[in-house]
Amino acid sequence: MAKKYDKIWTRTNEHLPSIIQGLDVQSTDYIIAVCGSGDQGLAILERAKRVLLVDNRPEQIEFMKTISACIKKGDYNRFLGARKGSSESYSSDGYWSSLNYFTPRRFNLLKTKMNNLEIRLGNIIKMARSEKGFNKLYLSNALNHKPLDSDIPMALKTVSDNTPKNGLVYLADSVIAHAPLWGLVKDEILTSKITDPYWSAVVLRKED
């Protein structure tokens, strides 16, 4: 039973194809991503060179480790079963279902890439400040949750200061209308590729 939260996320309610299109994921990318259910990071890992998943909730980290173990063992049925969730989990499918996104083909591809996935407990903004070599950040709606929501402008400044030139930042829930961007600019082309039916996502690019 989770101590800090009543429930955990066992699958995302974000539109995974939009994340891939918005971040323009390439085979050379090193991407730091919010962990959550792990769905987003796994979808990114399909195409990226390396992915670091970060979450400040220990229960989400433990869930992702369970999912990771299923993939490494090739246990597709257990992988699906864990993601279906229970009364102790969140697994909203009201507007788009990620449950069947990971087909056997995708699952088998992920199995070959698990050495390129790292999972860490921590604050993703602080992780972006200390981690070297990444070129893209997937933040989901992290800026709207504690502790980051207490100072969104400073969180964005930290992101900008540590994102390389032409690096990308994906925000599932746009907060840019009310905060300075500190050298980040909205990438209109990549943002236009996002077709998420629920989230008002935006892609930011670090200026040259």
Image (cartoon, helix red, strand yellow):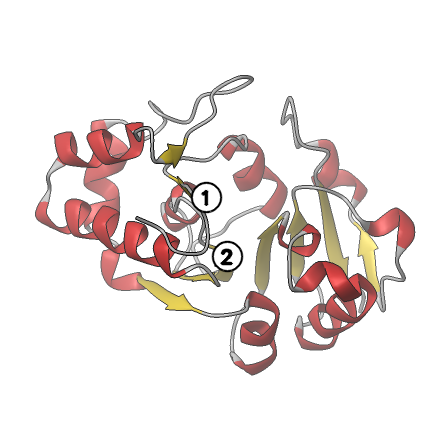
- Rendered location of residue 156, percent (x, y): 76, 65
Q: Marks 1 and 2: in contact by CB < 8 Å?
A: yes
What is the three-letter code of the residue carrying label 1? Gln
Give left or right: position of 105 versus 152: left
Question: What mark, if any, has residue 115 been given in the picture?
Answer: none
Q: Residues within 10 Å of mark 2 (few under 14, many from 20)?
A: many
Q: Is residue 64 above or below residue 121?
A: above
- Residue 16 x/y as whole percent: 49, 34
Q: Which of 191 and 39 is in front in this view?
A: 39
Element class at badge 2: strand
Quarter-wise, where is residue 154 in the image? bottom right
| Chain-order first, disc 2 or disc 1 | 2
Query: Would residue 88 appear left or right of 148 to someone viewing this image?
Result: left
The residue shown at (51%, 30%) is 13
Q: Mark 2 points at which residue?
A: 33
Q: What type is the residue that disc 2 sits on?
A: Ala
